[in-house]
Image (cartoon, coloured by chain):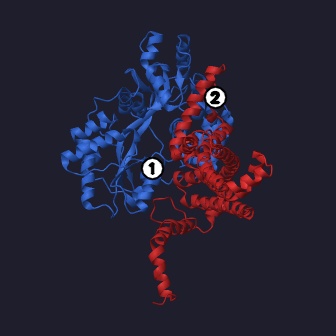
Chain colours: A blue, B red
Amino acid sequence: MNSKTEIQTQFEEMAKAYTEKTGVEVEVYNADTDTTVASQVATRYASNDPYTITMVDAKDIYALADEYAYDLSNEDWASHTKLGITVNGKLAGFPFCVEARGLIYNAEAIEKITGEEFKPENYATLDAFKGLLDQLKAGGMEQPTAILSEYWSLGAHYFAEVYEQQKDPDAFVNGLLGGTEDLDNNAKFNELMDTFDVLKEYNYMKGSAANADREESSMKLAAGDVAFMFGGNWDWSVIKEYDHSDKMGIMPVPENTSDSTNTTLVGGGTKYLFVDASDNTSDEQRKAALDFLNWLVSDADGNAFLTESCALVPAFDQVTADALDPLSTSVKEYADAGLIATYDFLPDDHMTVVGQEIMQKYLDDAMSRAEMAAAVEEYFKSATPIKH
Amino acid sequence: MKTNSLGYKVRQYLLFAGVTTFLFVAVVIVPFFYGLYLTFTRYDGVSTSKPFVGLDNYIAAFGDTDYWVSLGRTFVFSAIAVVLVNLFAFVLAYMVTTGIRGQNFFRAGFFIPNLIGGIVLGYVWKFVFNKALVQLSDMIGSGHAKSLLATPTGAMAALIIVSVWQYAGYMMLIYVAGFMSVSEDVIEAAKIDGCTGTQSIIHISIPLMTASFVQCLFLTITRCFMVYDVNFSLTGGDPYGDSVLAAMHVYNTAFQDKKFGLGQAEALILFVVCAIVGGLQVYVGKKAEVQA
């Protein structure tokens, strides 16, 4: 089952071609848009009819691995990636792609106003970044930034960096769960929120930030009406649908900070495939599934499917990826230098509580920073930790 | 053949109602009791083990303030939506039974929103609220207008508007049937006795249509309490999670937070509340029914 809905069409086309070539019947199921992936997987397991290969998020792998995932550690590709997920000695998750988040920029639009080449590394600090925004504003781009108002973007992507940029994210989250962390006085929290305040200040939807629509924001960025949008390389699939500049890329979120977090993107393997190990999948099906995973990594067609038609950054060192889109090229450059790892063990309701109930209010100026810090601390006191 | 033996009766029953009984048991009774069983377990949805936890889930459900807030919201939403849906439906039904030109066309037209699925309806209206109406008010007024969906009360109002639009046409059909069932004779007799149009509606048609009211109220109440699809696609709980209705909260608890036991317990409470309100309404309504 495919849970990356933006590559649904590519997946179906690939399945057809794959069947023609190998004779192996591939049926692609897509994640429903009106339910969660976990619930869909749950339904299939409850009816003893699981998918042979299932694409889930990293967190789901930890939950599912013990009972349902087949051990992949003997596969040829296993030694070519550092991003596979091993649970209790069993390599359970095949990293489908590398994704990273940061600030997407439209260099062409910026250069048109500044008249000089845009080098993201020159704007790593918030002060420098704000200077650039003012320059853009003076040059006629009234509101140069866009912030998506969707709770997953606010909660699971932006706010998550507060944990991920800590020296020891696990200890920090455990501290929050134990009620011992003081978020309001936490350096990373404040540095990231200082930047968020600036993004808010220059937001093209300022005043009705909650109405920001993902399609419209992406379109404005593509056209150069805004210069920056917080997001990730997955946003290319939306941007490319519009008349877009090719001089785009992703840069780390600027911060006035003393650590190096403003020079590195946050990311890692996202979307993992696992092969069902239960008796409901026949050995023959399992063999075909393993062949398919190998095909993705070591066959030229498989590589092309990943890097060209799906425009994904591969998680394997021997996969050629010359034809990537601008955002993925950025990600690959930063990834080769090392990424800040994503933190996969936030409680399940973190995204809705922190993203929707808290960050949306902060985005709308309906909540102060101190209130936000208190609300997040309060949330963690009653949150259910994820076993890992 | 003996027709009053037990064996004969059982065979007769199976012959006529066997298949439906089986289906009913398979898709309603069994899931209901399985759900009941889940409320006593801690289950994440995929695990093979379901540890028994007794009444923990019910205790947690009663302590889940978010749930009670969403249930309260559902009450407010339902109260307003039920009144408006039935008011609109009744007025529409009256208009399309008065013999105006093209009344069949209007009947079909008002019914159509009900044929569009809730999910699609939600997305369509989201566009209307966020884009069309905002553009329109930008053109008329000065400054950038905020969409109705951007404020908590606005989002609730939007949910009510869309629900009214969705259900009024359906309920209209039931009221149309009600109007048609009132015999011409009584109306004519009332007219001869000097009844005005309004008087004959209030004193003749409405009392004779009580059955339609009972039916429509029951349908709208249960649907409003259980609404999920429009809630999901129109607001998704935005802004700030302040438009999450009870069914959506239950869904999020079970499937997003992976607390199936707690979610089931909360669903059961919602079911009981809904059954009490619906049952009470039918009981009161039936008592008010009159025969011509």
Horizontal arrangement in the rendering, residue A300 relative to residue A64 (left or right): left
In the figure, B153 relative to A200: above or below?
Answer: below
In the figure, A353 relative to A188: above or below?
Answer: below
Comparing A227 with A49, the one in front is: A49
Same-chain status of marks 2 and 1:
no
Q: Residue A22: x and y, percent?
A: 19, 48
Task: Describe the element under mark 2 as helix, strand or loop.
Answer: loop
Comparing A200 with A208, the one in front is: A208
* Residue at the image point whose x is 62% and y is 55% from the top: B219
Q: Chain of mark 2?
A: B
**Neighbours of disc 2 within 10 Å: few (<14), some (14-19), many (20+):** many
Asked whether the residues under the numbered discs 2 and 1 touch, taking CB atoms below 8 Å apart as contact, a structural biologist would say no
Q: What's under tag 1, amino acid-wise?
A: Val
Residue B268 quadrant: bottom right
Q: Residue A78: x and y, percent?
A: 29, 47
Task: Describe the element under mark 1 as helix, strand or loop.
Answer: helix
Q: Chain of mark 1?
A: A
Query: Which residue lies under the disc numbered 2?
Result: B146
Query: Which residue lies under the disc numbered 1?
Result: A37
Q: Which mark is residue B211?
A: none
Q: What's under tag 2, amino acid-wise?
A: Lys
Q: Residue B220: x and y, percent?
A: 64, 53
* Residue at the image point whose x is 74% and y is 57% from the top: B207
